[in-house]
Amino acid sequence: MLVAITRAVSPAITRCELTYLERVPIDLPTACRQHRQYETVLRSVGVQVHALPPEVDLPDSVFVEDLAVVFDECAVITRPGASSRRPEGESIARALAPYRKLIYVREPATLDGGDVLVLGKDIYLGRSTRSNPHALEQMQNLLAPYGYTVRGVPVRGCLHLKSAVTQVSADTLLLNPAWVDAADFPGKKFIANDPSEPYAANALRIGATVLYQPAFPKTRDLLEQAGIRTRLVDESELGKAEGALTCCSLIFKA
Ligand code: CIR
């Protein structure tokens, strides 16, 4: 069985961190409605959703992906690059503790889960404004005993590695070539986003289903033409906070 940890949108979301986007008004009821719909879609594809209550004083706390990386053998609790986000980790660690042994990334490392792409035993760690070289070194040391290889990947122009590249089938990555280089992922097939949709490379693969945002119809056509079935789910209001589909859950085998 798959479990997803999610968290309700904080009423403080309007004070979210922003790196690449200009601040625009975020409509809280719309963001909450879309996020509940996201949870409904997760349930409809067989995922058991463990929805945490909102953290009223932590603006970005809906983006639970950044606080942990869950493996079959353990869960890494991160140390987010934005100091405002570090208090989000305690409740995520509590929620994960019944499922996994917890291991921690420690100061001076900074790591956002959005920078970690796990492809089997190969882990790709984005060198972004949020995740530093200490994180790469610590992740290598923490995960080598479990047989994982961790490689650093340069990322440019976007918040996280998974803003630029995500997995859409067993052997295929959806990638924005303006933000990350395909050569950093040897042995993979690629689908490039439509250039008019720069934020289109973040898809959430759950078994045979790929959840995808309606905001990117041209890239969705490219996925469908490649035989990849997409299921639409709209998190566009949280997109104004630089969030995407993978950011809003931590999904793992229970
Ligand atoms: C932040 O800047 O941390 C949030 N406003 C957005 C985080 C999105 N998370 C993700 O892509 N994994």
Image: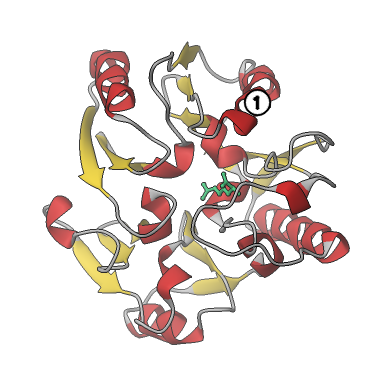
Q: Is residue 158 left or right of residue 124?
A: right
Number of dots carrying numbers: 1
Give the quadrant of the N terminus: top right
Q: As displayed, is residue 104 above or below residue 194?
A: above
Q: Outermost residue, front direction?
A: 22
Residue at horizontal 19 percent and vertical 65 percent from the top: 189
Residue 158, located in which quarter of the rendered image? bottom left
In front of the other: 183 or 129: 129
Q: Residues within 10 Å of mark 1 (few under 14, many from 20)?
A: many
Q: Respond yes or no on whether mark 1 lies under 8 Å from ligand 1.
A: no
Q: Position of residue 8 (x, y in %)?
A: 79, 44
Helix, strand or loop for disc 1: helix
Residue 23, located in which quarter of the rendered image? bottom right
- Name the image colouring: secondary structure
Look at label 1 and name its amino acid: Ile
Q: Position of residue 166 (x, y in %)?
A: 37, 57
In front of the other: 25 or 170: 25
Q: Is residue 140 visible?
A: yes
Residue at mark 1: 92
Residue at horizontal 57 percent and vertical 28 percent from the top: 83
Q: Position of residue 118 (x, y in %)?
A: 34, 40
Q: Position of residue 16 (x, y in %)?
A: 68, 48
Give the quadrant of the C terminus: top right
Q: Is residue 253 visible?
A: no
Residue at horizontal 18 percent and vertical 58 percent from the top: 188
Residue 249, located in which quarter of the rendered image? top right
Q: As displayed, is residue 69 above or below residue 9?
A: above
